[in-house]
Protein backbone atom coordinates (compact mmCIF):
# COMPACT_ATOMS: atom_id res chain seq x y z
CA UNK A 1 0.00 0.00 0.00
CA UNK A 2 3.04 2.30 0.22
CA UNK A 3 3.01 2.83 -3.54
CA UNK A 4 -0.42 4.49 -3.79
CA UNK A 5 1.17 7.87 -4.40
CA UNK A 6 3.16 6.35 -7.23
CA UNK A 7 -0.02 4.83 -8.67
CA UNK A 8 -1.70 8.24 -8.51
CA UNK A 9 1.13 9.83 -10.47
CA UNK A 10 0.95 7.07 -13.05
CA UNK A 11 -2.80 7.60 -13.29
CA UNK A 12 -2.26 11.31 -13.90
CA UNK A 13 0.26 10.55 -16.65
CA UNK A 14 -2.18 8.08 -18.20
CA UNK A 15 -4.97 10.68 -18.03
CA UNK A 16 -2.80 13.34 -19.64
CA UNK A 17 -1.65 10.95 -22.32
CA UNK A 18 -5.25 9.89 -22.99
CA UNK A 19 -6.23 13.53 -23.59
CA UNK A 20 -3.35 13.95 -26.00
CA UNK A 21 -4.10 10.64 -27.72
CA UNK A 22 -7.71 11.75 -28.23
CA UNK A 23 -6.48 14.94 -29.92
CA UNK A 24 -4.38 12.89 -32.29
CA UNK A 25 -7.20 10.41 -32.92
CA UNK A 26 -9.71 13.11 -33.83
CA UNK A 27 -7.56 15.88 -35.27
CA UNK A 28 -4.07 14.52 -35.87
CA UNK A 29 -2.67 13.27 -39.19
CA UNK A 30 -4.74 10.57 -40.84
CA UNK A 31 -4.33 8.68 -44.11
CA UNK A 32 -6.28 10.18 -47.01
CA UNK A 33 -9.84 8.95 -47.23
CA UNK A 34 -11.93 8.57 -50.33
CA UNK A 35 -15.10 10.58 -50.05
CA UNK A 36 -18.12 8.42 -50.66
CA UNK A 37 -20.29 9.26 -53.63
CA UNK A 38 -23.43 11.19 -52.84
CA UNK A 39 -26.29 8.78 -52.12
CA UNK A 40 -28.80 10.25 -54.52
CA UNK A 41 -31.17 7.34 -54.16
CA UNK A 42 -31.79 8.34 -50.52
CA UNK A 43 -33.29 11.64 -51.66
CA UNK A 44 -35.56 9.78 -54.06
CA UNK A 45 -37.25 7.72 -51.37
CA UNK A 46 -40.96 8.40 -50.81
CA UNK A 47 -41.43 11.34 -48.51
CA UNK A 48 -37.84 12.55 -48.84
CA UNK A 49 -37.70 16.34 -49.24
CA UNK A 50 -36.53 17.93 -52.46
CA UNK A 51 -33.03 19.33 -51.96
CA UNK A 52 -31.02 22.01 -53.78
CA UNK A 53 -29.05 21.02 -56.88
CA UNK A 54 -25.71 19.38 -56.20
CA UNK A 55 -22.57 21.35 -57.03
CA UNK A 56 -19.48 20.54 -58.99
CA UNK A 57 -16.31 22.58 -58.60
CA UNK A 58 -15.00 23.97 -61.85
CA UNK A 59 -11.36 24.40 -62.82
CA UNK A 60 -11.56 28.04 -61.78
CA UNK A 61 -12.64 27.08 -58.29
CA UNK A 62 -16.21 28.29 -58.76
CA UNK A 63 -19.22 26.05 -58.21
CA UNK A 64 -21.86 25.28 -60.78
CA UNK A 65 -24.97 23.18 -60.82
CA UNK A 66 -24.39 19.52 -61.50
CA UNK A 67 -27.31 19.80 -63.94
CA UNK A 68 -25.60 22.50 -66.03
CA UNK A 69 -24.68 21.58 -69.57
CA UNK A 70 -20.92 21.01 -69.79
CA UNK A 71 -18.73 22.65 -72.42
CA UNK A 72 -16.51 20.69 -74.80
CA UNK A 73 -13.76 20.40 -72.19
CA UNK A 74 -16.19 19.00 -69.62
CA UNK A 75 -16.21 22.11 -67.41
CA UNK A 76 -19.50 23.89 -66.74
CA UNK A 77 -19.32 27.54 -67.84
CA UNK A 78 -19.16 30.07 -65.00
CA UNK A 79 -21.87 32.68 -65.30
CA UNK A 80 -20.83 36.33 -65.10
CA UNK A 81 -21.22 37.72 -61.62
CA UNK A 82 -20.03 40.61 -59.50
CA UNK A 83 -18.87 41.15 -55.95
CA UNK A 84 -20.65 43.37 -53.44
CA UNK A 85 -18.55 44.48 -50.45
CA UNK A 86 -20.17 45.36 -47.13
CA UNK A 87 -18.30 46.84 -44.16
CA UNK A 88 -19.46 47.13 -40.55
CA UNK A 89 -17.58 47.88 -37.36
CA UNK A 90 -16.80 44.16 -36.82
CA UNK A 91 -17.17 42.52 -40.24
CA UNK A 92 -16.04 42.83 -43.84
CA UNK A 93 -18.40 40.87 -46.08
CA UNK A 94 -18.19 39.91 -49.75
CA UNK A 95 -21.46 38.85 -51.41
CA UNK A 96 -21.39 37.23 -54.85
CA UNK A 97 -24.29 38.16 -57.13
CA UNK A 98 -24.21 34.53 -58.25
CA UNK A 99 -26.80 33.30 -55.78
CA UNK A 100 -26.61 36.61 -53.86
CA UNK A 101 -24.72 34.54 -51.31
CA UNK A 102 -22.04 35.43 -48.79
CA UNK A 103 -18.71 34.07 -49.98
CA UNK A 104 -16.35 35.84 -47.59
CA UNK A 105 -16.53 37.24 -44.06
CA UNK A 106 -13.54 38.71 -42.28
CA UNK A 107 -13.75 39.21 -38.50
CA UNK A 108 -11.93 42.54 -38.41
CA UNK A 109 -11.48 42.60 -34.61
CA UNK A 110 -9.94 39.10 -34.52
CA UNK A 111 -6.46 39.05 -36.09
CA UNK A 112 -4.94 35.72 -37.07
CA UNK A 113 -1.75 36.72 -35.33
CA UNK A 114 -1.58 39.13 -32.42
CA UNK A 115 1.42 40.85 -34.00
CA UNK A 116 -0.40 41.42 -37.30
CA UNK A 117 -3.61 43.26 -36.45
CA UNK A 118 -4.23 44.12 -40.11
CA UNK A 119 -4.60 40.42 -41.03
CA UNK A 120 -8.03 39.36 -39.68
CA UNK A 121 -9.53 35.89 -39.46
CA UNK A 122 -11.46 35.13 -42.66
CA UNK A 123 -14.06 32.62 -41.51
CA UNK A 124 -16.09 32.35 -44.72
CA UNK A 125 -13.79 32.02 -47.70
CA UNK A 126 -14.21 31.38 -51.42
CA UNK A 127 -10.70 30.05 -51.91
CA UNK A 128 -11.25 26.62 -53.57
CA UNK A 129 -8.54 25.03 -51.39
CA UNK A 130 -10.33 26.00 -48.13
CA UNK A 131 -13.81 26.88 -49.34
CA UNK A 132 -16.38 27.72 -46.65
CA UNK A 133 -19.42 29.66 -47.89
CA UNK A 134 -23.10 30.26 -47.27
CA UNK A 135 -25.71 29.40 -49.90
CA UNK A 136 -29.44 30.13 -50.14
CA UNK A 137 -32.25 29.83 -52.64
CA UNK A 138 -35.78 28.65 -53.34
CA UNK A 139 -37.22 25.29 -54.39
CA UNK A 140 -40.43 24.68 -56.31
CA UNK A 141 -42.01 21.79 -58.19
CA UNK A 142 -44.04 24.11 -60.42
CA UNK A 143 -41.40 26.61 -61.59
CA UNK A 144 -37.68 27.38 -61.61
CA UNK A 145 -37.11 29.89 -58.81
CA UNK A 146 -33.66 31.34 -58.09
CA UNK A 147 -31.10 29.04 -56.45
CA UNK A 148 -27.49 29.59 -55.38
CA UNK A 149 -26.37 29.60 -59.03
CA UNK A 150 -28.81 32.28 -60.27
CA UNK A 151 -27.51 35.76 -61.06
CA UNK A 152 -29.10 38.51 -58.97
CA UNK A 153 -29.16 42.26 -59.48
CA UNK A 154 -27.68 44.68 -56.95
CA UNK A 155 -28.20 48.44 -56.71
CA UNK A 156 -24.60 49.04 -55.61
CA UNK A 157 -21.18 47.45 -55.28
CA UNK A 158 -20.22 48.77 -51.83
CA UNK A 159 -22.15 49.32 -48.62
CA UNK A 160 -20.88 50.53 -45.25
CA UNK A 161 -22.30 51.04 -41.79
CA UNK A 162 -21.96 54.79 -41.28
CA UNK A 163 -21.34 56.65 -38.06
CA UNK A 164 -24.56 57.08 -36.12
CA UNK A 165 -26.29 54.19 -37.93
CA UNK A 166 -27.29 51.01 -36.12
CA UNK A 167 -27.72 48.85 -39.22
CA UNK A 168 -27.26 48.68 -42.97
CA UNK A 169 -29.43 46.78 -45.46
CA UNK A 170 -28.15 45.23 -48.69
CA UNK A 171 -30.90 44.26 -51.22
CA UNK A 172 -30.75 41.96 -54.26
CA UNK A 173 -33.49 41.27 -56.81
CA UNK A 174 -34.27 38.49 -59.26
CA UNK A 175 -37.15 38.39 -61.77
CA UNK A 176 -38.41 35.52 -63.89
CA UNK A 177 -40.02 35.85 -67.35
CA UNK A 178 -43.34 34.49 -66.00
CA UNK A 179 -43.79 37.28 -63.42
CA UNK A 180 -42.13 35.93 -60.28
CA UNK A 181 -40.06 38.57 -58.48
CA UNK A 182 -37.81 37.70 -55.53
CA UNK A 183 -36.09 40.23 -53.29
CA UNK A 184 -33.32 39.10 -50.94
CA UNK A 185 -32.30 41.55 -48.21
CA UNK A 186 -29.40 41.16 -45.76
CA UNK A 187 -29.40 43.29 -42.61
CA UNK A 188 -26.10 43.88 -40.81
CA UNK A 189 -26.12 45.46 -37.33
CA UNK A 190 -23.58 47.44 -35.38
CA UNK A 191 -21.39 45.33 -33.10
CA UNK A 192 -23.16 42.14 -34.16
CA UNK A 193 -22.13 38.92 -35.90
CA UNK A 194 -25.77 37.98 -36.51
CA UNK A 195 -27.02 38.68 -40.03
CA UNK A 196 -30.75 38.74 -40.77
CA UNK A 197 -31.90 37.57 -44.19
CA UNK A 198 -35.32 37.91 -45.81
CA UNK A 199 -36.40 36.49 -49.16
CA UNK A 200 -39.67 37.98 -50.36
CA UNK A 201 -41.51 36.27 -53.19
CA UNK A 202 -43.92 38.54 -55.13
CA UNK A 203 -46.18 36.57 -57.44
CA UNK A 204 -47.14 38.80 -60.39
CA UNK A 205 -48.29 35.88 -62.51
CA UNK A 206 -51.86 34.65 -62.91
CA UNK A 207 -51.13 31.29 -61.27
CA UNK A 208 -50.50 30.26 -57.68
CA UNK A 209 -46.85 29.68 -56.82
CA UNK A 210 -45.75 27.24 -54.13
CA UNK A 211 -42.24 26.63 -52.91
CA UNK A 212 -39.78 26.52 -50.05
CA UNK A 213 -36.61 28.28 -48.96
CA UNK A 214 -33.32 26.47 -48.38
CA UNK A 215 -30.31 27.70 -46.44
CA UNK A 216 -27.04 25.79 -46.34
CA UNK A 217 -23.33 25.91 -45.56
CA UNK A 218 -20.80 24.39 -47.91
CA UNK A 219 -17.26 23.61 -46.73
CA UNK A 220 -14.24 21.76 -47.98
CA UNK A 221 -12.86 19.36 -45.39
CA UNK A 222 -9.66 20.94 -44.03
CA UNK A 223 -6.45 19.15 -44.79
CA UNK A 224 -5.02 17.23 -41.86
CA UNK A 225 -1.74 18.86 -40.94
CA UNK A 226 1.25 16.61 -40.55
CA UNK A 227 3.47 18.00 -37.83
CA UNK A 228 4.90 17.56 -34.41
CA UNK A 229 2.95 15.49 -31.90
CA UNK A 230 3.43 18.44 -29.53
CA UNK A 231 1.79 20.94 -31.87
CA UNK A 232 -0.06 23.73 -30.07
CA UNK A 233 -2.11 24.83 -33.06
CA UNK A 234 -5.74 25.61 -32.23
CA UNK A 235 -6.98 23.55 -35.16
CA UNK A 236 -5.14 20.50 -33.83
CA UNK A 237 -7.10 20.49 -30.57
CA UNK A 238 -10.70 21.16 -31.48
CA UNK A 239 -13.55 19.58 -33.42
CA UNK A 240 -14.00 20.91 -36.96
CA UNK A 241 -17.17 19.82 -38.69
CA UNK A 242 -20.92 20.27 -38.80
CA UNK A 243 -23.50 20.35 -36.03
CA UNK A 244 -27.27 19.91 -35.97
CA UNK A 245 -29.39 21.01 -33.03
CA UNK A 246 -33.05 19.97 -32.72
CA UNK A 247 -35.43 20.00 -29.78
CA UNK A 248 -35.65 16.21 -29.84
CA UNK A 249 -32.02 15.17 -30.39
CA UNK A 250 -30.40 18.31 -28.94
CA UNK A 251 -26.75 18.91 -29.84
CA UNK A 252 -25.42 16.46 -32.44
CA UNK A 253 -22.03 16.47 -34.15
CA UNK A 254 -22.06 15.31 -37.77
CA UNK A 255 -18.47 14.87 -38.87
CA UNK A 256 -17.21 14.99 -42.44
CA UNK A 257 -16.80 11.21 -42.29
CA UNK A 258 -20.45 10.88 -41.21
CA UNK A 259 -21.56 13.02 -44.16
CA UNK A 260 -19.40 10.98 -46.52
CA UNK A 261 -20.96 7.75 -45.27
CA UNK A 262 -24.62 8.75 -45.65
CA UNK A 263 -26.92 11.69 -46.26
CA UNK A 264 -28.82 13.09 -43.32
CA UNK A 265 -32.61 13.40 -43.54
CA UNK A 266 -34.22 14.88 -40.42
CA UNK A 267 -37.02 17.25 -39.42
CA UNK A 268 -37.26 19.52 -36.41
CA UNK A 269 -38.68 22.72 -34.98
CA UNK A 270 -36.70 25.58 -33.42
CA UNK A 271 -33.49 23.98 -34.67
CA UNK A 272 -30.29 25.20 -36.31
CA UNK A 273 -27.32 23.98 -38.35
CA UNK A 274 -23.69 25.00 -38.10
CA UNK A 275 -20.14 24.41 -39.26
CA UNK A 276 -17.81 24.92 -36.32
CA UNK A 277 -14.09 25.03 -35.61
CA UNK A 278 -11.87 26.10 -32.75
CA UNK A 279 -13.03 29.49 -31.45
CA UNK A 280 -15.36 30.32 -34.40
CA UNK A 281 -18.53 29.12 -36.12
CA UNK A 282 -21.05 29.82 -38.85
CA UNK A 283 -24.67 28.86 -38.13
CA UNK A 284 -27.97 29.18 -39.97
CA UNK A 285 -30.96 29.68 -37.67
CA UNK A 286 -34.36 29.18 -39.35
CA UNK A 287 -37.42 31.19 -38.32
CA UNK A 288 -38.68 30.40 -34.81
CA UNK A 289 -41.57 27.91 -34.68
CA UNK A 290 -40.87 26.60 -38.18
CA UNK A 291 -40.83 22.84 -38.87
CA UNK A 292 -37.80 22.46 -41.13
CA UNK A 293 -36.19 19.56 -42.97
CA UNK A 294 -32.44 19.09 -42.51
CA UNK A 295 -30.04 17.39 -44.88
CA UNK A 296 -26.37 16.81 -45.62
CA UNK A 297 -24.58 16.08 -48.89
CA UNK A 298 -21.13 14.82 -49.76
CA UNK A 299 -19.83 16.40 -52.97
CA UNK A 300 -16.78 15.37 -55.00
CA UNK A 301 -13.29 16.40 -53.84
CA UNK A 302 -14.18 16.48 -50.13
CA UNK A 303 -16.76 19.28 -50.32
CA UNK A 304 -19.64 18.89 -47.85
CA UNK A 305 -23.00 20.58 -47.34
CA UNK A 306 -25.37 20.83 -44.39
CA UNK A 307 -28.65 22.65 -44.90
CA UNK A 308 -32.26 23.28 -43.92
CA UNK A 309 -35.45 23.56 -45.98
CA UNK A 310 -38.52 25.46 -44.81
CA UNK A 311 -42.10 24.14 -45.07
CA UNK A 312 -43.85 24.55 -48.42
CA UNK A 313 -45.79 27.80 -48.77
CA UNK A 314 -48.35 28.84 -51.41
CA UNK A 315 -48.38 32.38 -52.80
CA UNK A 316 -51.55 33.43 -54.61
CA UNK A 317 -51.44 35.64 -57.72
CA UNK A 318 -50.82 39.25 -56.71
CA UNK A 319 -49.65 38.22 -53.21
CA UNK A 320 -46.25 37.91 -51.57
CA UNK A 321 -44.52 35.72 -48.98
CA UNK A 322 -41.41 36.50 -46.93
CA UNK A 323 -39.04 33.76 -45.76
CA UNK A 324 -36.91 34.76 -42.78
CA UNK A 325 -33.74 33.30 -41.27
CA UNK A 326 -30.55 34.44 -39.56
CA UNK A 327 -26.90 33.67 -40.17
CA UNK A 328 -24.37 33.91 -37.35
CA UNK A 329 -20.73 34.13 -38.41
CA UNK A 330 -18.29 34.95 -35.66
CA UNK A 331 -16.55 33.97 -32.44
CA UNK A 332 -17.97 31.53 -29.89
CA UNK A 333 -18.81 34.21 -27.33
CA UNK A 334 -20.88 32.22 -24.88
CA UNK A 335 -22.98 35.03 -23.42
CA UNK A 336 -23.82 36.19 -26.96
CA UNK A 337 -24.68 32.72 -28.29
CA UNK A 338 -27.06 32.04 -25.39
CA UNK A 339 -29.26 34.96 -26.53
CA UNK A 340 -29.49 33.92 -30.19
CA UNK A 341 -30.87 30.36 -30.23
CA UNK A 342 -31.42 27.51 -27.76
CA UNK A 343 -28.31 25.38 -27.45
CA UNK A 344 -26.12 27.56 -29.67
CA UNK A 345 -23.71 28.08 -26.76
CA UNK A 346 -23.01 24.31 -26.87
CA UNK A 347 -20.81 24.93 -29.90
CA UNK A 348 -18.26 25.89 -27.24
CA UNK A 349 -17.27 22.26 -26.77
CA UNK A 350 -16.37 21.52 -23.14
CA UNK A 351 -16.81 17.79 -23.66
CA UNK A 352 -18.61 15.36 -21.38
CA UNK A 353 -17.99 17.49 -18.29
CA UNK A 354 -19.87 20.55 -19.59
CA UNK A 355 -22.05 20.58 -16.47
CA UNK A 356 -18.89 21.29 -14.44
CA UNK A 357 -17.11 23.43 -17.03
CA UNK A 358 -19.94 25.93 -17.50
CA UNK A 359 -20.00 27.03 -13.83
CA UNK A 360 -16.21 27.31 -13.93
CA UNK A 361 -16.41 29.59 -16.97
CA UNK A 362 -19.17 31.60 -15.29
CA UNK A 363 -16.85 32.15 -12.31
CA UNK A 364 -13.93 32.95 -14.61
CA UNK A 365 -16.06 35.51 -16.44
CA UNK A 366 -17.13 37.15 -13.16
CA UNK A 367 -13.52 37.55 -12.06
CA UNK A 368 -12.66 38.98 -15.48
CA UNK A 369 -15.35 41.62 -15.06
CA UNK A 370 -13.77 42.49 -11.72
CA UNK A 371 -10.08 42.53 -12.78
CA UNK A 372 -10.42 43.12 -16.58
CA UNK A 373 -7.57 40.62 -17.05
CA UNK A 374 -8.03 36.96 -17.85
CA UNK A 375 -4.74 36.02 -16.20
CA UNK A 376 -5.82 37.39 -12.84
CA UNK A 377 -9.21 35.76 -13.39
CA UNK A 378 -7.44 32.38 -13.70
CA UNK A 379 -5.44 33.08 -10.54
CA UNK A 380 -8.54 33.84 -8.48
CA UNK A 381 -10.53 30.97 -9.95
CA UNK A 382 -7.67 28.72 -8.84
CA UNK A 383 -7.83 30.21 -5.34
CA UNK A 384 -11.61 29.76 -5.25
CA UNK A 385 -11.41 26.11 -6.34
CA UNK A 386 -8.68 25.56 -3.78
CA UNK A 387 -10.91 26.99 -1.05
CA UNK A 388 -13.83 24.81 -2.16
CA UNK A 389 -11.66 21.71 -1.81
CA UNK A 390 -9.78 22.98 1.24
CA UNK A 391 -11.14 20.34 3.65
CA UNK A 392 -10.66 17.53 1.14
CA UNK A 393 -7.09 18.65 0.50
CA UNK A 394 -6.45 19.00 4.23
CA UNK A 395 -7.66 15.43 4.75
CA UNK A 396 -5.36 14.24 1.98
CA UNK A 397 -2.34 16.11 3.35
CA UNK A 398 -2.95 14.87 6.90
CA UNK A 399 -3.03 11.32 5.63
CA UNK A 400 0.19 11.84 3.67
CA UNK A 401 1.81 13.53 6.68
CA UNK A 402 0.89 10.53 8.83
CA UNK A 403 2.29 8.23 6.16
CA UNK A 404 5.45 10.34 6.09
CA UNK A 405 5.70 10.02 9.89
CA UNK A 406 5.66 6.22 9.52
CA UNK A 407 8.51 6.17 6.98
CA UNK A 408 11.21 5.21 9.54
CA UNK A 409 9.10 2.31 10.83
CA UNK A 410 8.31 1.16 7.30
CA UNK A 411 12.00 1.27 6.42
CA UNK A 412 12.74 -0.79 9.54
CA UNK A 413 10.17 -3.38 8.42
CA UNK A 414 11.66 -3.41 4.94
CA UNK A 415 15.18 -3.98 6.28
CA UNK A 416 14.03 -6.70 8.66
CA UNK A 417 11.84 -8.65 6.23
CA UNK A 418 14.07 -8.20 3.21
CA UNK A 419 12.54 -9.47 -0.07
CA UNK A 420 9.61 -11.26 1.57
CA UNK A 421 6.95 -8.99 0.05
CA UNK A 422 4.04 -11.01 1.38
CA UNK A 423 5.24 -10.74 4.96
CA UNK A 424 6.13 -7.10 4.46
CA UNK A 425 2.62 -6.25 3.20
CA UNK A 426 1.03 -8.07 6.17
CA UNK A 427 3.28 -6.24 8.63
CA UNK A 428 2.68 -2.92 6.88
CA UNK A 429 -1.12 -3.29 7.07
CA UNK A 430 -0.82 -4.18 10.76
CA UNK A 431 1.27 -1.05 11.32
CA UNK A 432 -1.35 1.09 9.53
CA UNK A 433 -4.08 -0.45 11.70
CA UNK A 434 -2.12 0.09 14.90
CA UNK A 435 -1.26 3.71 14.07
CA UNK A 436 -4.81 4.35 12.71
CA UNK A 437 -3.52 5.55 9.34
CA UNK A 438 -5.63 5.17 6.18
CA UNK A 439 -3.26 4.76 3.19
CA UNK A 440 -6.10 5.65 0.80
CA UNK A 441 -6.79 8.90 2.62
CA UNK A 442 -4.14 10.75 0.61
CA UNK A 443 -5.39 9.57 -2.78
CA UNK A 444 -9.19 9.60 -2.78
CA UNK A 445 -9.58 13.36 -2.09
CA UNK A 446 -7.25 14.07 -5.02
CA UNK A 447 -9.19 11.72 -7.32
CA UNK A 448 -12.42 13.56 -6.49
CA UNK A 449 -10.89 16.77 -7.80
CA UNK A 450 -9.74 15.33 -11.15
CA UNK A 451 -13.06 16.06 -13.00
CA UNK A 452 -12.73 19.71 -11.95
CA UNK A 453 -9.16 19.85 -13.28
CA UNK A 454 -10.22 18.31 -16.61
CA UNK A 455 -13.17 20.72 -16.91
CA UNK A 456 -10.96 23.72 -16.27
CA UNK A 457 -8.54 22.44 -18.88
CA UNK A 458 -11.27 22.44 -21.56
CA UNK A 459 -12.52 25.85 -20.44
CA UNK A 460 -9.06 27.34 -20.93
CA UNK A 461 -8.58 25.58 -24.27
CA UNK A 462 -12.04 26.29 -25.77
CA UNK A 463 -12.98 29.79 -24.55
CA UNK A 464 -12.43 32.32 -27.36
CA UNK A 465 -12.52 34.99 -24.68
CA UNK A 466 -9.01 33.87 -23.71
CA UNK A 467 -7.72 33.82 -27.30
CA UNK A 468 -4.66 36.10 -27.51
CA UNK A 469 -5.53 37.43 -24.02
CA UNK A 470 -2.51 38.97 -22.26
CA UNK A 471 -1.57 38.54 -18.60
CA UNK A 472 1.61 40.27 -17.37
CA UNK A 473 5.23 40.62 -18.45
CA UNK A 474 6.17 37.99 -21.05
CA UNK A 475 2.78 36.24 -21.01
CA UNK A 476 0.91 38.03 -23.78
CA UNK A 477 -1.26 35.14 -25.02
CA UNK A 478 -2.80 32.80 -22.45
CA UNK A 479 -4.11 30.48 -25.17
CA UNK A 480 -0.59 29.71 -26.46
CA UNK A 481 2.42 28.06 -24.88
CA UNK A 482 4.79 30.09 -22.73
CA UNK A 483 7.28 31.49 -25.30
CA UNK A 484 10.19 31.24 -22.84
CA UNK A 485 8.99 28.12 -20.95
CA UNK A 486 9.29 29.97 -17.63
CA UNK A 487 5.94 28.78 -16.23
CA UNK A 488 6.59 25.10 -17.07
CA UNK A 489 9.96 25.31 -15.30
CA UNK A 490 8.32 26.88 -12.24
CA UNK A 491 5.72 24.11 -12.36
CA UNK A 492 8.48 21.47 -12.42
CA UNK A 493 10.15 23.06 -9.40
CA UNK A 494 6.86 23.13 -7.50
CA UNK A 495 6.29 19.46 -8.31
CA UNK A 496 9.77 18.62 -7.02
CA UNK A 497 9.03 20.43 -3.74
CA UNK A 498 5.73 18.57 -3.39
CA UNK A 499 7.54 15.27 -3.82
CA UNK A 500 9.82 16.16 -0.93
CA UNK A 501 6.74 16.72 1.29
CA UNK A 502 5.14 13.42 0.31
CA UNK A 503 5.98 10.00 1.76
CA UNK A 504 8.54 8.24 -0.43
CA UNK A 505 7.88 4.75 -1.86
CA UNK A 506 9.68 1.92 -0.10
CA UNK A 507 10.46 0.32 -3.44
CA UNK A 508 13.83 1.80 -4.59
CA UNK A 509 12.89 1.41 -8.26
CA UNK A 510 9.63 3.35 -7.80
CA UNK A 511 11.46 6.03 -5.84
CA UNK A 512 14.02 6.37 -8.63
CA UNK A 513 11.36 6.61 -11.33
CA UNK A 514 9.44 9.27 -9.41
CA UNK A 515 12.56 11.45 -9.25
CA UNK A 516 12.17 12.02 -12.99
CA UNK A 517 8.50 13.04 -12.81
CA UNK A 518 9.14 16.79 -12.34
CA UNK A 519 11.34 16.80 -15.45
CA UNK A 520 8.84 14.74 -17.47
CA UNK A 521 5.93 17.01 -16.56
CA UNK A 522 7.99 20.14 -17.20
CA UNK A 523 8.54 18.99 -20.79
CA UNK A 524 4.92 17.87 -21.12
CA UNK A 525 3.51 21.17 -19.84
CA UNK A 526 5.90 23.22 -21.98
CA UNK A 527 3.53 22.77 -24.92
CA UNK A 528 0.25 23.41 -23.08
CA UNK A 529 -1.55 26.78 -23.14
CA UNK A 530 0.16 29.12 -20.68
CA UNK A 531 -3.22 29.85 -19.04
CA UNK A 532 -3.51 26.19 -18.04
CA UNK A 533 0.08 26.04 -16.77
CA UNK A 534 -0.61 29.23 -14.80
CA UNK A 535 -3.48 27.42 -13.08
CA UNK A 536 -1.26 24.46 -12.14
CA UNK A 537 1.55 26.71 -10.86
CA UNK A 538 -0.84 28.63 -8.58
CA UNK A 539 -2.57 25.40 -7.50
CA UNK A 540 0.75 23.72 -6.67
CA UNK A 541 2.00 26.78 -4.78
CA UNK A 542 -1.12 26.86 -2.61
CA UNK A 543 -0.94 23.08 -2.13
CA UNK A 544 2.69 23.30 -1.00
CA UNK A 545 1.82 25.96 1.60
CA UNK A 546 -1.14 23.98 2.93
CA UNK A 547 0.75 20.68 2.92
CA UNK A 548 3.83 22.19 4.63
CA UNK A 549 1.74 23.66 7.46
CA UNK A 550 -0.15 20.40 8.05
CA UNK A 551 3.02 18.30 7.89
CA UNK A 552 4.76 20.56 10.44
CA UNK A 553 1.74 20.32 12.75
CA UNK A 554 1.56 16.52 12.65
CA UNK A 555 5.31 15.99 12.93
CA UNK A 556 5.41 18.53 15.77
CA UNK A 557 2.79 16.56 17.71
CA UNK A 558 4.72 13.36 17.16
CA UNK A 559 8.01 14.81 18.53
CA UNK A 560 7.19 14.52 22.34
CA UNK A 561 6.17 10.86 21.99
CA UNK A 562 9.65 10.00 20.68
CA UNK A 563 11.38 11.78 23.57
Image (spheres, rainbow, N blue to C red):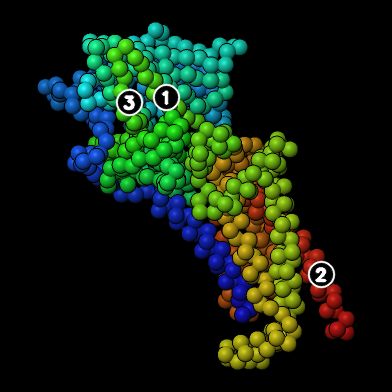
Name which of mark 2 and mark 1 comes first in the sequence: 1
On the question of residue 527 being in view, the answer is no
Q: Where is residue 18 in the image (x, y as percent from the top left)?
A: 48, 59
Front residue (pair 66, 117): 66
Which residue is label 2 attached to?
A: 552
Which residue is label 3 attached to?
A: 313
Q: Which mark is residue 324?
A: 1
Which part of the image, by quadrant, shows the N terminus? bottom right
Picture quadrant where residue 452 is located: bottom right
Task: Determine the CA span between mark 3 and mark 1.
Answer: 13 Å
Q: Residue at x 44, y 33 (%)?
A: 289
Front residue (pair 191, 371): 191
Image-based side of 543 in relation to 208, left or right:
right
Q: Residue at x 77, y 60 (%)?
A: 545
Q: Position of residue 263 (x, y in %)?
A: 28, 42
Kindly give the residue lying farthest to the top in the view shown: 155
Amino acid sequence: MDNLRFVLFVFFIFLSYSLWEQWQLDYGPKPPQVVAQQQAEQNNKPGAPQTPPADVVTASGRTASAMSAPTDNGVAPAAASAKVVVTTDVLRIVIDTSGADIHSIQLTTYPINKDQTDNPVELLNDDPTKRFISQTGLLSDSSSPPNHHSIWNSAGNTYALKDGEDSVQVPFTWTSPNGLKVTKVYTFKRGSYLIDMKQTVLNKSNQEWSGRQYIQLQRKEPEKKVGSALSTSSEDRAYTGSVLYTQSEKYEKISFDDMADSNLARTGKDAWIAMIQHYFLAAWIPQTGEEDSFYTKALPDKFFVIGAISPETAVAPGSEKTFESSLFVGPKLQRTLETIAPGLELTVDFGNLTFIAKPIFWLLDKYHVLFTNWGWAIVFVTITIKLLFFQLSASSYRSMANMRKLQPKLKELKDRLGEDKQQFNVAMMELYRKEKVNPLGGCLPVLVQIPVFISLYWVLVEAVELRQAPFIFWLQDLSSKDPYFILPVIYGISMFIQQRLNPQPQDPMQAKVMQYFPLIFTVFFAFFPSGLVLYWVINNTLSILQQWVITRQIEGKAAPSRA
